[in-house]
Image: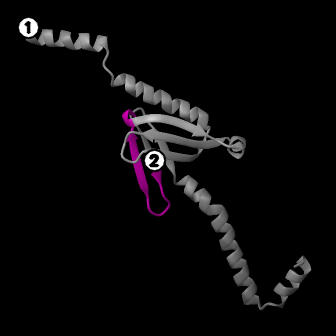
């Protein structure tokens, strides 16, 4: 159909039909353009020194927290379009019941993966005993016995 035929067909319609078509077109544009933006604005990923916190949802919310001690692996991937846009997919493998979590459209995903890995390593070091910790515990026990 040519543009002229469409214009002639629209001109032949009653005024109310033209308004209905315009409203439907606006709803379609709003749905296709605004909804993804709204979902993106209401999705939050927070990395702290103790856990990974995820919150998603526009009308109904859901969330998940993963303690850093349960994180086994952190990896990322991004295709050509993601690289052009500066984002990617971050995959967090946890030792919990739910397995892995896939976080999509993460800005600067390589840097985010590095930071999260450093947080996991720091948490592991903070909760791991070595010989110096053992010696300090022995000294505390000896001091308590005296």
Residue named by callout 1: 146
Q: Pointer 1: residues within 10 angstroms few (<14), some, or many (20+)?
A: few
Q: Look at 8% across and 7% down and name the residue there.
A: 146
Secondary structure category for the residue under label 2: strand
Q: Quadrant of residue 84?
A: top right
Asked if residue 139 is positioned above or below residue 34 in the image, the reply reads above
Instruction: Report if residue 27 lies within the magenta region.
Output: no
Residues 44 and 73: in front is: 73
Asked if residue 75 is positioned above or below residue 38 in the image, the reply reads above
Q: Look at 38% across and 26% down and name the residue there.
A: 124
Relative image position of residue 55 (x, y in whole percent): 45, 51
Q: Quadrant of residue 99?
A: top left
Residues drawn in magenta: 55-70
Relative image position of residue 7 (x, y in whole percent): 87, 82
In this rendering, position of residue 85 left or right of residue 134:
right
Instruction: Report if residue 67 lies within the magenta region.
Output: yes
In this rendering, position of residue 52 left or right of residue 138:
right
Secondary structure category for the residue under label 1: loop
Relative image position of residue 131 (x, y in whole percent): 30, 11
How many numbered discs sit on the rendered protein?
Answer: 2
Residue named by callout 2: 54
CA gap between label 2 and label 1 equals 49 Å
In this rendering, position of residue 110 left or right of residue 74:
right
In this rendering, position of residue 5 left or right of residue 93:
right
Circle 2/circle 1 CB separation < 8 Å: no
Q: Look at 69% across and 68% down and name the residue there.
A: 29
Q: Look at 18% across and 12% down and name the residue there.
A: 140
């Amino acid at each position: 159909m040519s543009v002229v035929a469409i214009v002639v067909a629209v001109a032949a319609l009653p005024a109310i039909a033209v308004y209905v078509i315009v409203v439907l077109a606006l709803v379609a544009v709003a749905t296709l353009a605004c909804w993804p933006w709204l979902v993106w604005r209401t999705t939050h990923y927070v990395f702290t020194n103790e856990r990974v916190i995820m919150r998603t949802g526009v009308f109904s919310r859901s969330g998940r927290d993963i303690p850093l001690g349960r994180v086994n692996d952190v990896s990322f991937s991004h295709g050509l379009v993601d690289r052009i846009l500066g984002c990617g997919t971050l995959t967090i493998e946890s030792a919990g019941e739910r397995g892995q979590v896939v976080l999509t459209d993460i800005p600067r995903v390589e840097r985010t993966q590095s930071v999260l890995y450093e947080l996991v390593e720091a948490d592991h070091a903070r909760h791991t005993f070595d010989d110096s910790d053992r010696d300090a515990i022995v000294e505390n026990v000896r001091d308590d016995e005296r």
